[in-house]
Amino acid sequence: MVTTTTTTKTTVSVRVRKEKNSFNPLNGVLIYLQFTTNYSTCIKKRTTTTTTTTKTTTTMNNSSLFRYKFTMSFWIYVVMILMIPVSAVDQQQQKEQTVLEAAAVDNSNNNGDMNNDNDPSSKTCSNIPQNDAGTGRKDCSADQEEQETQQAIQDVIDYVRENDGYINEKLKIYRPPGSAVRGIYTMEELEKDEIICELPWKLLISPENKHLYFDVEYEVEDKQEDSDEEANSDEEKYDEEEEGQSESQTDLCDSIDMLYVDMKYNLTAYGRFLRYHQPYRYIPSLWTEGGKMVYRDILDPDGKPHYFDQVPLFCELDSEVEENQLLLQDELWIHADMLIKARADDWYLTPFYDMTNHRNGPKYYNTHHIVDYGKTFTLTTNRRIMAGEQIYNSYNDCNKCDSRRHDYDTAQMFMDYGFVEDYPRFFLIESVRLKFRIHEEEEDEVRESPNENNNDEIDNASTESTTPTTTTKRVEFALPPSDLGVTYLEKEIERLEEFKNDNMALWMIDDDDDGKRKDVTEIRYKGIVLKQSELDAVLSLYDAFVSDYKLAIEAAKGKTSSAVWVECDPSEWWYTENYEEEGC
């Protein structure tokens, strides 16, 4: 195994699978014919002797040659048939033994500690498990952790570039002062259609690359990216997903297995970054029981199904299989499952690109995907990007997001990713046929700042300071809101505010009333412990529901209509984006 390339095959397998038998009787027939031809030639050469002096020739008669050919090839063919199944069984037994050993390594450690003596970063802060609060790591200063994370990011960039990938030199990944989120920023202006990154498919965590991680074969299908004009309709896409559900699930599980092996055995800088520098269990489906409980109580009990609580893992394993039981107790495998769900596009995970943050709106979303399946992944700009801007992706409104732009709203995004998106936000409430977006609009005032150095040459940062003077929210209804929809919003605000009054301890406002919650060593909800990070995420969702629902109620005054119930198809109304121009 190597740590800087993906060209070395490892025979590690992490879950028992029924791989396709590599023996085909037709192949045996072809081998038989090839053998008899070669054997015949060999016999003739060995049984024919020629001397230059006497020029006498001794040749085996045809009947003897035929008997040799038939007898030898027959028994060799029989042995081939008998040995290949035995070989397949041996491989399967080896894979079973490997997964038992691999999963047992992590489960033998106390408290989920995943230390590896062979890991080059085993002596660093980044290898120390996260503390119970889920913020930071034990015995590590914030500066030390930030420094090591930045080095791990640079290692990923170097890994991509050293293995035939391209990352634009104008980009820099860092956490701006005062920000809690790290992002990709451009240090120089980027032109429209300029390449941000381009990676050969071999660098992706994807089933097409399974042969680089496991001793198996994978048939690469010819998957071509549809243009925007030729993209499948949403209805066709749903049908395709339903028919190909089993295959899709296999692809996801394969990717999870590959990432697990990459992280566990420190195969690449990318795997090490994800293992040591990404938080564990940050999506609601993997929260503590206390975190799930408070989240469950904030959600509308009559709204969308709480599938986050019913299907906690992306890859559905048969818990009766011994190896799967070990994996379900393996914190690193669970981490791999979560990362594929939270950071992958479809079933493939792309180094560097997966560090782009999400934000919608023409002011922010500035990228375009070009995917040549099995060959290259390319991300370009969709407009000119000025120096200092952050590179943004979109999880539901990108050029390849298909139906997500119609029905994947802010609440759904929180359920899958564990964060409340910045404005613009999108709400789809199916029970009352309500669909609206909220945009944040700023009026900027540009003012000159004095040059502290009193130099004639003044850089851009010191000559201008763009300060938002006013920020307004604008509600955009895709369809006219109905009285039933407005009533729903009013009742939801009442229910949520009652929840807050009954659980004020969760907000922990201090005596100075400065809006900051006190730090506590243990947080409980209904007697069950939850993490600080989980509570912070849930309360941000609470704030979004209350504030944005109030804005929608105010914007709906004088605009209510029964059109969504009278004119719109009950199975397709949510596809409407602009009722005034499109109708239902």
Image (cartoon, rainbow, N blue to C red):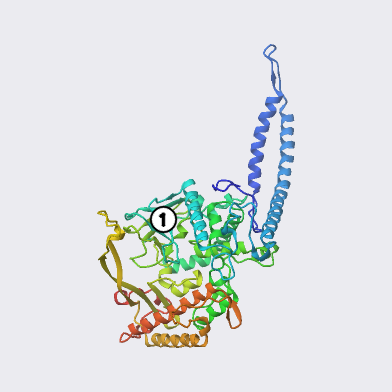
Residue for point 72% across, 40% down:
76
Q: Amino acid at mark 1?
A: Lys
Residue for point 55% across, 51% down:
268
Q: Position of residue 19 (x, y in %)?
A: 64, 55
Q: Is residue 523 above or below residue 331?
A: below
Q: Indicate the secondary structure of the residue bearing disc 1.
A: strand
Q: Position of residue 270 (x, y in %)?
A: 53, 54
Q: Is residue 438 above or below residue 504?
A: above
- Quadrant position of the C terminus in the picture: bottom left
Q: Nearer the viewer, residue 354 or 275?
A: 275
Q: Is residue 314 above or below residue 527?
A: above
Q: Residue 429: tell me if it is visible.
A: no
Question: Left or right: where does residue 384 sit relative to residue 235?
Answer: left
Name the image quarter holding residue 245: bottom right
Q: Nearer the viewer, residue 488 or 563?
A: 488
Q: Position of residue 253 (x, y in %)?
A: 58, 61
Q: Which residue is mark 1?
A: 172
